[in-house]
């Protein structure tokens, strides 16, 4: 199984260089901070961290999502490739992925270990953004499979993200009658006042300014989530005739 994982990862990152890193890596590596835990006290952060180790962990998360349904989608690979090359260029991508393949041969990919690692080094809103980007990769072929969804749910748990935040981001990729309410993390029976309050809270949580220190590709992802929150609110207002 492990050799099969390596084969997929090698195929992904050399024939189609691209990545979750195109969204995440950038200045995130230079902006580690104490992790804000959603359950219990925040984890303490280490005083120093290797940017190389951070890259490897993010690449590992991407590989876990992409291989989770037992197949590698060409569309997902193209999506990954476009973002990484756009952000960092082909030469840097190849160098990063060569290192990944050299090091990962001596490591077991562990979502729980990676989740703890990121908990200790990133703020809560950054981990929300990581989940959103992983959803984007899974959805690149137009469909998030049950296997991919299960993997995303597992990763969200290891990242110590609250279930309601997972459901909110999930609703941005799944169409249903009550999606707008799920995105705002409220019930359909919520009053108009509760809807407005939820919108203000979600807009604050997902506001792009929270990630203004990140690179452009990362901020665009934040803007997309923020736009989904606005659209959800407008949909509910229109539905209620407000």
Image: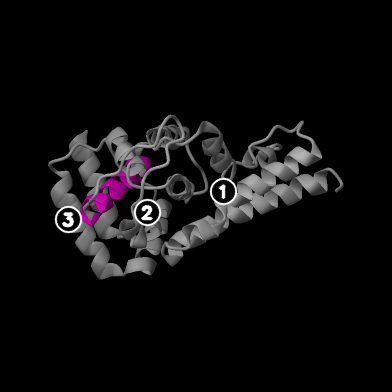
The 10 Å Cα crowd at callout 1, few under 14, some 14 to 19, many 20 or more, is: some
Report whether residue 62 is seen.
yes
Q: Residue placed at 31% from the left, 45% from the top?
A: 63
Discs 3, 2 touching: Cβ within 8 Å: no
Q: Is residue 15 left or right of residue 142?
A: left
Q: CA distance from mark 3 to mark 2?
A: 16 Å
Where's the N terminus, which quadrant?
Answer: top left
How far across and how far down the image is residue 91, in percent?
Answer: 24, 69
Q: Residue at the spot x=44%, y=59% of the render?
A: 218
N-terminal of the two: label 1 or label 2?
Answer: 2
Density class for disc 3 (Cα within 10 Å; few <14, some 14-19, many ≥20) is: few
Image-based side of 5 in relation to 172, left or right: left
Q: What residue sits right under mark 3 in the picture?
A: 99
Q: Is residue 238 left or right of residue 133?
A: right
Residue hosting label 1: 205
Q: Is residue 18 visible?
A: no
Q: Is residue 150 above or below residue 18?
A: above
Is 41 drawn above or below residue 129 in the view shown?
A: above
Stretch in magenta: 51-65
């Amino acid at each position: 199984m492990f050799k099969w994982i390596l084969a997929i990862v090698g195929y992904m990152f050399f024939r189609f260089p691209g990545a979750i890193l195109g969204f995440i890596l950038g200045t995130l590596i230079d902006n580690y901070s104490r992790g804000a835990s959603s359950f219990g006290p925040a984890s303490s952060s280490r005083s120093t961290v290797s940017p190389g180790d951070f890259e490897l962990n993010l690449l590992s998360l991407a590989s876990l999502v992409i291989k989770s349904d037992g197949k590698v989608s060409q569309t997902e690979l193209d999506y990954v490739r476009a973002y990484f090359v756009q952000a960092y260029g082909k030469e840097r991508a190849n160098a990063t992925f060569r290192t990944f393949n050299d090091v990962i041969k001596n490591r077991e990919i562990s979502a729980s270990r990676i989740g703890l690692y990121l908990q200790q080094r990133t703020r809560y809103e950054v981990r929300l953004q990581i989940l959103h980007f992983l959803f984007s990769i899974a959805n690149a072929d137009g469909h998030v499979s049950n296997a991919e969804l299960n993997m995303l749910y597992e990763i969200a748990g290891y990242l110590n993200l609250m279930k309601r935040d997972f459901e909110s981001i999930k609703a941005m990729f799944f169409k249903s009658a009550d999606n707008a309410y799920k995105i705002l993390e409220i019930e359909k029976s919520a009053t108009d006042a509760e809807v407005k309050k939820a919108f203000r809270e979600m807009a604050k949580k997902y506001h792009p300014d929270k990630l203004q220190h990140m690179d452009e590709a990362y901020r665009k992802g934040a803007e997309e989530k923020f736009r989904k929150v606005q659209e959800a609110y407008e949909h509910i207002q229109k539905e209620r005739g407000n």
